[in-house]
Image (tube, coloured by chain):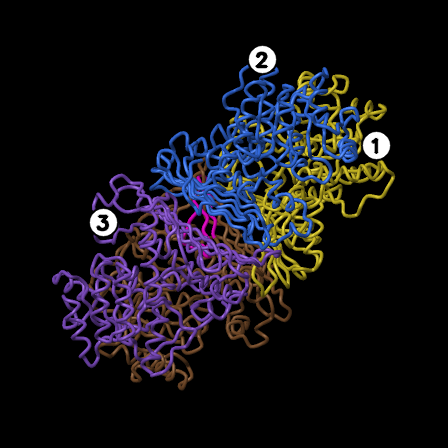
Chain colours: A yellow, B brown, C blue, D purple
Amino acid sequence: MTDMGQPIDYNTAPIRLGMVGGGEGAFIGTVHRYAARLDGEYRLIAGALSSDPERAKASGAALGLDPARTYADFRVMARRERRLKDGIEAVTIVTPNHMHFPVAKAFLKAGIHVICDKPMVASSREARALRKLVEVSGALFACTYNYSGYPMVRQAREMVAAGEIGAIRVVQVEYLQDWLTEPIEASGQKQAEWRMDPARSGGAGAIGDIGTHAFQLATFVTGLEPVELSADLAAFVEGRRVDDNAQVMLRFAGGARGMLWASQVAPGNENGLKLRVYGARGGLEWSQEDPNRLWVTRYGEPKRLISRGGAGAGAAAQRITRIPAGHPEGFLEAFANIYAEVARAIRARRAGKAVDPAVLFPGIEDGARGVAFIEACLRSSRAKGRWVPI
Amino acid sequence: MTDMGQPIDYNTAPIRLGMVGGGEGAFIGTVHRYAARLDGEYRLIAGALSSDPERAKASGAALGLDPARTYADFRVMARRERRLKDGIEAVTIVTPNHMHFPVAKAFLKAGIHVICDKPMVASSREARALRKLVEVSGALFACTYNYSGYPMVRQAREMVAAGEIGAIRVVQVEYLQDWLTEPIEASGQKQAEWRMDPARSGGAGAIGDIGTHAFQLATFVTGLEPVELSADLAAFVEGRRVDDNAQVMLRFAGGARGMLWASQVAPGNENGLKLRVYGARGGLEWSQEDPNRLWVTRYGEPKRLISRGGAGAGAAAQRITRIPAGHPEGFLEAFANIYAEVARAIRARRAGKAVDPAVLFPGIEDGARGVAFIEACLRSSRAKGRWVPI
Amino acid sequence: MTDMGQPIDYNTAPIRLGMVGGGEGAFIGTVHRYAARLDGEYRLIAGALSSDPERAKASGAALGLDPARTYADFRVMARRERRLKDGIEAVTIVTPNHMHFPVAKAFLKAGIHVICDKPMVASSREARALRKLVEVSGALFACTYNYSGYPMVRQAREMVAAGEIGAIRVVQVEYLQDWLTEPIEASGQKQAEWRMDPARSGGAGAIGDIGTHAFQLATFVTGLEPVELSADLAAFVEGRRVDDNAQVMLRFAGGARGMLWASQVAPGNENGLKLRVYGARGGLEWSQEDPNRLWVTRYGEPKRLISRGGAGAGAAAQRITRIPAGHPEGFLEAFANIYAEVARAIRARRAGKAVDPAVLFPGIEDGARGVAFIEACLRSSRAKGRWVPI
Amino acid sequence: MTDMGQPIDYNTAPIRLGMVGGGEGAFIGTVHRYAARLDGEYRLIAGALSSDPERAKASGAALGLDPARTYADFRVMARRERRLKDGIEAVTIVTPNHMHFPVAKAFLKAGIHVICDKPMVASSREARALRKLVEVSGALFACTYNYSGYPMVRQAREMVAAGEIGAIRVVQVEYLQDWLTEPIEASGQKQAEWRMDPARSGGAGAIGDIGTHAFQLATFVTGLEPVELSADLAAFVEGRRVDDNAQVMLRFAGGARGMLWASQVAPGNENGLKLRVYGARGGLEWSQEDPNRLWVTRYGEPKRLISRGGAGAGAAAQRITRIPAGHPEGFLEAFANIYAEVARAIRARRAGKAVDPAVLFPGIEDGARGVAFIEACLRSSRAKGRWVPI
C-alpha cells in the first residue's frame, strides 16, 4: 500500500456540534452525521431533531444525547446552548428547506457557527438578509454543496485556475436521476412528496433539488461568473406541479457558454452528476459516479487519467485525501471533507488565528447564488426561454 | 466463433457506379469507395472526380477507371452514361456542399439513382426543388447520414418503435470534436478551410457539419417530429466567421424536449456523437465511439448492455450485421450498410419488385429536414435564442 | 434522492474499543479508526499504540485517550483492561505481522474480542494454536479481509449461493499494484521496507500482502473449497528477497479451476483487485476500483449491471448499504462494514442472544486458510510449480 | 473531420486471387473475402470452394466466378492456374485445419503466394516441412493471425521495441468467449462440431482455436522468446473431448513471466482478447473489443489513452490507419490490414523490388510457433502441469 496523501488530524478536543432536524426516518441528517463522525473532529451533543416533541425526544435518545440537551424547539436550543459553558460551537441545519432561514437566523444571532443544507433559503430576499446576519454575527457559515468536497473536483478547480486548459469556452454540466420517473409522490413516498410540493420546495423541482448542485459545481470548478440564462423547465409526469426535467443554456462573463441539464425522469441514471469544461488549450471531464478519477486533455496530446492520490494529483486534492490511490473514496468522504474544512476553520477561530487560505467550503455566496439561479430559471422558463440575467 | 447474424449477399452482377467529386486528396470520396467496395455489391466504373480536368484524369487512372469513362464535366457524364448500354446505374456525389444540388439535378434528370453526401443542399428552396425532381425521375435518392447505418442505432430505433421505453420525454444528443480548437483554417488545412468559409459552407459551421448528423440521428431513432428550437451559436476561435460551438434546445410534437450540443472546439473529443433517449418506461444510450453496444434500461430493472450480434439484438440490427458479437464493426461497416441498403433497393428496382420495407436508408426527407434544421438554428441564434419553428 | 437501503443503528452505548499498534505514522491503524468511527458504534478508549513508550504516549495523547489507558506493553494492557469495570470489550490488532500472534493470544486469554489485521499469523502452526485459543476463550475473532465488506461482493456471494450462475467452472482473480516497481525499500520507504524484508513479512512478498486478499475474496464469493495449487513466484526488482509478482493456478473441490495473479510491479495499476466467476449458467465480474457495480450475465441474455442500492440488489447487499444508489461508497465504508458486522455480533453477545445468521465477517478460518495458502504457494514455487495441496 | 493517417493506395492492377475452401455456409471464408475486398487490392477470380463438386460450382457462381475458374479439386486448380497467363498470383486457404498442409504444399509448389488461415498445420513435423517448401518456392507465405493487423497492436509493439516501458517483466494475455458454454456441438452447430472433434481439430480445443491467437499476440507485441510453459487444460461441458478452458503459465527468455487464459465457457464474454504488458518503466493494456485505444502508463505518471489516429500514435499505427481518430475501425479493417500488407509485399515482388521493412504480416514462423505452443500445452497438461519447453 502506498503512502497516503494528507493525514487527517486527531485532536483531543472535538468540536461540540448540535443538529436541527434529522430525526428518525430522515435521510440527509443521517448523511451529515456520517460526515461529522468520520474524522473524529466533531461530537454531536445537542439537538432539536424534530418539531414533534415526542419524536425529538426519541431521536435524541437513539443517538445517545443527554436528555437535557434534547430540545423540542430550536429557538430554545439556540438561546440555551449559547449560555452553557460547554454549549455547542456549531449547528447543522437539516430541516425541510422552508425552515432553513429561521433556524439559521436563530443560531447566527447566538453566535454559533452554522452548517446549512442546500438550497440555503427560499428567495434572494432571504439570502440577502442571511448574508447580513452572517456578517454581523462573525460566525462561520457553510452551505453543504457537498460535491465540491471531492478531491478530484478540487483537482479540476486547481488545474483550471493554473491555466492548464486555457481560457474557458464551454461548460457542460448535467445531473441525472430516475427516481421520479413515476408519480411516486402520489403514493406517499416521503422524499418525493415534499420535493414535488410547490409550497415546501419553493416552486422549483429538479432545478432546485439537483440543478443547484450542478450549477454550484460548474461555478466552483471554473470560477466563471454566470451572467444570463435561458431555461426550459418541464413536468413530464401527469399531475406533477413542479419541474422534473430542466434544460438551461448559460452565458458567462468573458463569453463562455454552457448548458445545464437536470432531470429526475431519466431511467438508467442514479445520481449522474457530470461536469465537462473546455478551454482554448485543453479539456476536463469528471463524473460523480466515478469520483476518484479526472480526465484531462491538453490539446494535441493523449487524454490523461488522473486518479485521486495518484501521479499528477496536486496539492488541492492531496490535502483532502484520506487513503491511497486505488482505494475508492466516495460520497461520504466528500461530504466529510466539507465538515473537515469547516472544522479547520473553527479550530483556527478557537485559536484566534486566521483560517488557512487553502481551506475551502461553500458558504453564503454559494448559497445565495444557488437561490438566484433557481429564480432565474423559473423566470426564464415562464417567459418561454427568454434570456434573463442571473 | 459464433454464427454471424445476417450474411451479406454476393451477386454475379454488381451495381454499376459512378462518382462525382472525390478525386485525389479528397477525404470523403475515399470513405464512400471503401463503403461501396466492402460487400462487393458495386463496381466503380465512371467518374467526374474533379472539376480540374488534369486532376480528374489522373484520379481516374489511379482508380483504374477506363479513360473513356473519366469525365471532366459532370453534365457530360450524366448525359453520356444515360445512353450507354452498360452505363452507370447509380452515382455518388461527394463534391463540396454547394455543388450537391446541380449535380444531383443532372443525374436525376438522367434517371440515375443518386447517393448524395450531407448536407444535401444549401437551402430549403433547393431541397423543395430536389424533392420534386426525385418524384418526377422515379430514381432512388439517398443522403448519406451514415450514422444511421450502425446496427445498434437500428436496434435503438426498433426498441423505441416497439414501445420498449414508453412515450419519449427527453432526447439528448451531442456531437463533439476538437480538431478546430485552434485556427487551423488560417494555416491552410483543407478540410478546415472550406468548412470555415461561409461562402462554401453556407454560413453554418459546426451546426452544419456535425450538428445535422446529431439532429438526424435523434429523429431517426426516436421517430419524433421536431417542432421548434432555440439556438445559441458561437465562434470561439478569433477571426472565425462561422460557429464552432452550437447549443440548441428542442421541442418535439407530443411534448418531448431535447438538447443538442455540437462542438468542434472540445479538446479530448475526437468524434463524440452520443444519443440518449428517455421515456416513461425506460432509457437508451448509444455512443458512436463504442458503436457495437447499446445501453438499455427498463425503469426499475438493472441496466442491460446489448451488443451487436449478441443476446437481445433484434431483427433490425441483425439484418445489417456482418460478423459475430465481440468482433467490432466500425465506421466503415456502418457507412457500407447505407450502400448495402441502397443496393438492395436498386436490385429490387432491377427486378421490378417492391423494395422490402425493412430496407432503410436516409433519403430526400432526411436531407430536407437537415437543411431546415440549419436554417432554423441560424435564425434563432441571430434572434438571441428566440424559439423558432423548424 | 431515493430512500437508502438499510439504516445503520445508532446506539446509546458504543462498544468500548482498544488498539494495539497504529501509533503516529502508521497507515493501517488510521484506516481501522476511520472504519470504527463511521457508524458511531465504537469508542476508542485504550491503546498500546507503539512498542516505543514515548511514541505510545504521544500517540495516545494525539487521539485523546486517557493517559491512564495508554499502555507501553500490550500484555499489561490486556491484564488491566480485563479487570476494569469499563474495560475494553474488543481490541484491534494493527501491529507488524509477526506480532499478531502473541498479541491476539494475550487478549483472547483475557476474554476480549479480537479484530486482527491480515495475514492473521505467520504459520499454519500458529493458526492452529490460535484457533484453539478462540474456541476456549469464547471471544469473537475477526480477521480484516476488508474487501469482503463491499456490498456488491456480498451481492455476488448471494447470487452464487442462489445458483444464479450454476455450478462454478472457472474462478479468475487478480490483484495488481505498481508501487514496488522500483526498489523503494532500499531508499527507506517504510511501508515497502518491512514488507520486502523476509524476517518481518514471513518470506512472502506480494503473495502474502495482496495475494491473500485475492484468495480470500475468491473463496468468500464462491464458497468453493480450494484443493491444490501450482505457483510461480518471482522477484523482478534487483536485490529483492521476496516475490513481487505471483502467478498461481488453482483447483477446487468439484473440479473448478482458477488462476490468481498478484503483482506489485504492474505500472498503471493502483489497487486493481478484480474477481471473475463463471459457471454453467452465467458469469459475474467485480472490480474493487469500481466497487459499487457488479456485472452479471445469465448465459443467453444481455449483460446486466447491478448497482449498490439499485434495482436487482438483494438483501445481502442492502443490509450493509448506507446511502442510495449512485452515491459512491468506497474502501472505508467496506472496511467499516467489517467493523459494523463485528459490532452486531458483540451487541448480540452483550444481550445474551444468538448472532443473526446474516451477520458476516471473516474469522479464524479465513485467517487460517490465508496462511495455508501462502505456505502452499511458497512450497509449489520452490518446487518449480509442482502442484501441492492447500 | 481531421486528416486521415495513411491513405490506402488504389491501383490499376488488383492482385489476382484464388480461394480454397470458403464455399457457401462457411464463416471464415466470408471474412477473408471482406478483407480482400476492402482496399480494392485484390480481385477474386478462381476457387476450389468446396470438396463437394456441386457445392463448389454453386459457390463459385454465387461469387460471380468464371465457371472455367471454378474447381472441384485444389490440386487441379494449382496446376492449371500456374500455367494460365492471367493465373492467380495468390491463394487464400480457408479449409478445415487438417487440410491446410496439403493445400499449401500444392500452391507453394506452383510458385503461388499463400495466405493461410490459422492454426497453420497440424504438427511441428508438418510445420518444418512447410517451412522448407516456402524457402524453396520463393513464394510469400502469410498466416492470418489477424489480431496483429490492428493499428493499436502495432502501436504497442512499436512502443515496446522503443523501450517505452523498459525491460518486460510480466505478460498477461487472455481470450474469452462463451459460445461453448453449453454442448451445442451435440445439437449440430457446425462451427462447434468440427472444433470439438479431436480428429478434425487436432486434439486441441480452446487452446488451438483461440489460445494460439492470444499466444501470437503476446509474442508479436513483446518480441519475447517463449521458453517453457505449464498448462492446465479442462473440458467442463459433459461429454466434450477437447478442452474448452485452458490455463497456462509462461516463462520467456530473459526472465519475463506470463499467464495465458483461453476459455470458451466464460458467460458474458463474446470475443474478449486482452493483452497487458508490464516492464521496468511502464505498462501497456489493449483489448480487442475496444480496439481503437491503447492504455499506456509510464511509471510515476498518469495513465494515457492513445487512440488510433490520435495524438501519440506513431508511424507503425498510422501507416495502416484508414480513417481519422474517433471513427472506429474494427475487426474487418484489421483483417484487411493483413491482406493489405501482403499486397504491398506482392507488389514489391512484381516490381522486382525489396519489400519495405515496415511491411509486417505473420508468416511461417508465427504459424510454426503456434503449432509448437499447442503441442507443448497438450504435453504439459497431460503431465499434470509439468513445465515443458516450447
Q: Secondary structure at mark 2?
A: loop
Q: Mark 1, mark 2: which one is toward the viewer?
A: 2
Q: Amino acid at mark 1?
A: Gly
Q: Which residue is mark 1?
A: A111
Q: Residues within 10 Å of mark 2 (few under 14, many from 20)?
A: few
Q: Which residue is mark 3?
A: D197
User: For this rendering, which residue is in front, B109 or A48?
Assistant: A48
Whole-percent x, y for residue A101 in the image: 74, 33
Q: Amino acid at mark 3?
A: Asp
* Residue lying farthest to the left in this orientation: D54
Q: Secondary structure at mark 1?
A: loop
* Residue lying farthest to the bottom in this orientation: B54
Whole-percent x, y for residue D320 in the image: 42, 69
Q: Chain of mark 1?
A: A
Q: From mark 1 to mark 3, how far is it between C-alphas?
A: 84 Å
Q: Magenta stretch?
A: B275-297
Total numbered labels placed on residues in the image = 3
Q: Residues within 10 Å of mark 3 (few under 14, many from 20)?
A: some
Whole-percent x, y for residue D62 in the image: 19, 64
Please tell me in which quadrant of the rendered image residue C85 appears: top right
Q: Residues within 10 Å of mark 1 (few under 14, many from 20)?
A: many
Against A99, residue A333 (above or below) is: below
Q: Amino acid at mark 2?
A: Gly
Query: Image check: B317 left or right of B186?
Result: left
Q: Does the magenta portion include A232?
A: no
